[in-house]
Image (cartoon, rainbow, N blue to C red):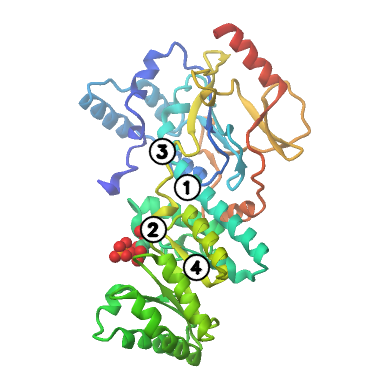
Amino acid sequence: MLNTLRNNPLLLTDSYNLSHARLKCNMDWEVSHLYNRKEGMILYGFRETVTELLSIQITEAHVVEAERCAAMQGLAFPSELFRRVVSECNGYAPIAVESVPEGTWCPAGTPFAQVYNTVEGFGELVTWWEGMFMHAYFPSGCATEAFHMRRYLEAKQAEHGADDGFLWRIHSFGFRGHRGLEDAYWAGTAWNLSLQGTDDFHTTHHTPQAVIGSIAALAHKVTQQYDDELACFMHAIDSTADAGEKIVALVIDTYDANRVIELYLPELGRRARQRGVRIVMRPDSGDVLEQAIAIYRVAQANDLLDAVGVIIGEGMNFEQVKRYDARLEAEGVPLAFVAYGVGSGFYNHIDRDTYGWAMKTAYSNGKDRMKFAMAAIKRSIPGRVRLVRVEGELTAIAHEGEETNGEEVYETIYKHDGTGKPHMMVAGAAFWNEVRDRIRVQNPQQQAIKLSAAIERKIAALAEQYL
Ligand SMILES: O=P(O)(O)OC[C@H]1O[C@H](OP(=O)(O)OP(=O)(O)O)[C@H](O)[C@@H]1O
């Protein structure tokens, strides 16, 4: 059940891994890389995913349960391997996990994490939790989407000479569309890394230093209580002023949005101004963009632009934001007049393929190894690497024998040498602040990872041997 999801870390793997200890011819030492093969991205959520999992101490009871579960599938569990983790390694996986600091822009093809075993004979543990590590594609995808949205807002803000209020134009309506709370946690905290307006209330708990906010807003369930819709809107303005708040959103499509725009808006705008409140009209069905433009025209004609705005929250995603903005610009509607509520359009298109996540072996059975595949995008990098930044560009170089004065990029987020407790870099609110600050200074210009001459030579030699 849900409250036992992490009870036994040995079960958090694909069933085929149960056979690999026996199918392999050597488990002495292994190195694997995790890549975003398709497109550049911001890494986020990997450290927490890894350390939450690997901080669980493996016990004999875990092994016994895993044996029983394997039998249910007609498989044998590699008990000896894990009994050695319990008896020789104090129950912690003897591996190391290195990754780029979260919040870093990773060009396509970056081995953004590298995993290797630290005690001989435990090579199979390097990839045991591959599936779990992969789950960080979702927070990373969300952080990347939010990063691009922030950059778009900043570019438009500069183009229009707008003040910082412009950065609140995109607001998260995403909470209700999630498949579960873990997704809501990742998407919500990723949103807060780059964006400010959000109705994901629970994220206040996880990102206490975030610059985020929301506003009072009508829902249909509120307007439906009133026999007179106009009276509801008037009450919303008055009660917002009485509460000492300055802004309230009015959903306008409970009955007839056109009636609200044409008949009620002038009176509402005047009351709002009188009470020191700004009303944000929320079209929510029909041609919401046309309604937004009509609201602007009515507000302009009645000299109410200081007291009225719009938020569109129906069917939004980043692409729709850009399309709507282009139309508003063509219509002469200032972009600051219209905000957007982006719901599941923020994250629904993000899957493991969006940025091309995969984990591939780089060293095993005593040699550098490489996957060539039938498609260039699926090629991996042979050998353990170091990631360095050379003249601003992220570059993979061979771990041994390559001189560099580039800045080293990997940090070791988990390492256990077999005795005592593992070294771990914790994730948490302070770490989230660091990630947010790092994202602010990322430049997404580098499209693809650079490989050093030594790595290119290894690839050429392996091609000679295997192709
Ligand atoms: O972008 P989304 O993930 O769809 O979320 C945003 C939508 O959610 C709410 O309405 P809801 O869909 O609950 O009801 P409605 O269809 O009656 O507007 C809100 O009024 C937005 O329209």
The answer to which image quadrant residue 134 occupies is: top left
Q: Secondary structure at mark 1?
A: helix
Q: CA distance from mark 3 to mark 2?
A: 45 Å
The mark closer to the camera, 4 or 3, is 4
The answer to whether residue 34 is left or right of residue 282 is right
Q: Position of residue 95 (x, y in %)?
A: 51, 30
Report the front residue among 263 and 230. 263
Label 4 neighbour load within 10 Å: few <14, some 14-19, many 20+ = many
- The residue that mark 2 highlights is 315
- The residue that mark 3 highlights is 57
Q: CA distance from mark 4 to mark 1?
A: 24 Å
The answer to which image quadrant residue 56 occupies is: top left
User: Looking at the picture, which amino acid does disc 3 mark?
Assistant: Gln
- The residue that mark 4 highlights is 339
Write down which quadrant ligand 1 falls in. bottom left
- The residue that mark 1 highlights is 139
Q: Secondary structure at mark 2?
A: loop
Say if disc 2 is inside 8 Å of ligand 1: yes
Q: Secondary structure at mark 4?
A: strand
The answer to whether marks 4 and 2 mark residues whose Cβ atoms lie closer than 8 Å is no
Q: CA distance from mark 1 to mark 2?
A: 22 Å
Mark earlier in primary sequence (4, 1): 1
Q: Is residue 429 visible?
A: no
